Amino acid sequence: MPALLSLASPRIARWPSCLPVAALLGLLTMTVQSAEAMSIRELRALEKSDARQGANYKRYYLVGAMEATVAAHDAGVRAGATPSICLNGRRLEPAMAEGLYQTELKRNSDLYEADMPVGLVLQNALATVYPC
């Protein structure tokens, strides 16, 4: 029995020291995966994935992406970047997200590929509709 413990003890002693590194790598992987933006192709697949709720999933994603785009733009402007989206007191409502997205895709259909992020389309749409 002591021989078995002597063989296992180095392994057990090494395992806890690797645990923080493994936990850190796992956390980084989850963070990077959650930070990826949905592509145009993935958004279309999401809409088709559920016959009853797919259109709602698409709308909800577009509203969130639009709000995130405006928030990121505002943070950049506060940090010193030049503004490209200026609301100037005009309203930007959640119901407008899908229309902005679809109009930008139709207006510049030759510019966008299916693997481009949805946020890029919305950023360009907002910069076109609300120029500075």
Image: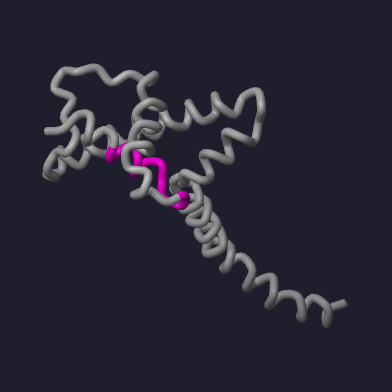
- Asked whether, in this view, residue 80 is left or right of residue 126, the answer is left
Q: Is residue 128 left or right of residue 65?
A: left
**Picture coordinates of residue 107, whole percent (x, y):** 32, 37
Q: Quadrant of the N terminus?
A: bottom right
Measured from the top left, where is residue 22 in percent x and y?
56, 62
Instruction: Please provide percent x and percent y for residue 17.
Output: 57, 68
Q: Is residue 117 magenta?
A: yes
Q: On the rendered image, what quadrant is the C terminus found in? A: top left
**For residue 13, what is the image quadrant?**
bottom right
Q: Main secondary structure of the magenta part?
A: helix
| Residue 94 shown in magenta | no
For the rendered model, the colour scheme is one colour
Front residue of 97/15: it is 97
Which residue does the image show at 54% across and 29% down from the upper left?
57
Residue 44 picture quarter: top right
Apparent side of residue 56 relative to residue 113 in the rendered image (left or right): right
Tally the numbered discs. Answer: 0
The residue segment tinted magenta is: 114-124
Residue at the spot x=58%, y=62% of the render?
19
Identify the residue at horizontal 35%, vertical 31% (top origin).
103
The residue lying toward the viewer, choosing from 103 and 93, is 103
